[in-house]
Amino acid sequence: MIGLLDSGIGGVTVLKEIIKLIPNGHFIYYSDSFNNPYGDKGSDELYFIVKSIVDYFLKRGVVAIVIACNTASAICVKRLRNEFPTIIFIAIEPAYKMVHDYNPSGKTLVMATKGTLESEKFLSLYHKYDNNNTILFPCVGLADLIETGDISSVDKYLFDNLNKYKNVDNVVLGCTHYPLIKDNIRNVLGNNINFFEGSIGVSKELLRQLKKRKIDYEYKKLKIEFIDSSDNILKEKRFRNLLG
């Protein structure tokens, strides 16, 4: 089994990419909506939360853990790898390097949580690939609106906060919730925006690590177990609808 964790259902965008490469995998998806949002928590508090999910995964016998949350990845993955050196941890990160690779001169807007943008891991990435034409925008509360499915509030949030960035060329989606509202972002910023997100890179790295360690990851058919820490049955319904 492969474990995926996120502060809610946003990590479904990562799982969809993984399934393209591992169509017959067994997955446990852990939606930690009880502790959502992650972006406003201190590093020690968040590590304690994420480690408890990791402990649960290990008791279930997972062979790899995907941290499908940019904030949790940025703050926790280094400590997790030190504490559990034999476990495969695949961590998502904002796809800022992809801007450097594909459209380095374009004006870029990085949308992410405050916790992600202030993390040592992201700042290291940012300073390494900074194109001197980048805006960092902490989207306080946006992931929560997406999580609840309140699209009218999402549209109002985007209109109120993104209108002044209509001249950008690239948008880095630095939270796994944000790919769910690409069309809504286009409605504000225009149809010619280049989107960059980390889910494709995560799926490729997971497959590479499994093959490297010769770990069996294919079964007779796809199986996805969904767990929500607040026991909200509506979360699973929306998760599976989004997963398709």
Image: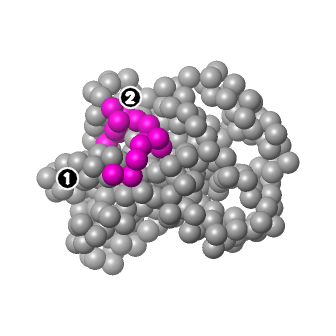
Q: Position of residue 122 (x, y in %)?
A: 55, 62
| Residue at the spot 55% in from the left edge and 33% down from the top edge | 141
Q: Amino acid at mark 1?
A: Asp
Q: Say the numbered circle drawn on residue 235.
A: 2
Crowd band around label 2 with a 10 angstrom C-alpha radius: few (<14), some (14–19), many (20+): many
Crowd band around label 1 with a 10 angstrom C-alpha radius: few (<14), some (14–19), many (20+): few
Q: Quadrant of residue 104?
A: bottom right
| Residue at the spot 22% in from the left edge and 72% down from the top edge | 86
Depicted 155 relative to depicted 202: above or below: above
Q: Is residue 31 left or right of residue 56?
A: right
| Residue at the spot 55% in from the left edge and 45% down from the top edge | 113
Q: Position of residue 205 (x, y in %)?
A: 44, 68
Q: Position of residue 228 (x, y in %)?
A: 30, 34
Q: Does residue 35 belong to the magenta stretch?
A: yes
| Residue at the spot 81% in from the left edge and 51% down from the top edge | 168
Q: Position of residue 153 (x, y in %)?
A: 62, 23
Q: Quadrant of residue 123?
A: bottom right
Which residue is label 1 attached to? 55
Q: Does residue 81 belong to the magenta stretch?
A: no
The Cα atoms of the two marked residues, 1 and 2, are separated by 23 Å
Q: Amino acid at mark 2?
A: Lys
Chain part drawn in magenta: 30-44
Depicted 232 relative to depicted 33: above or below: above
Q: Secondary structure at mark 2?
A: helix
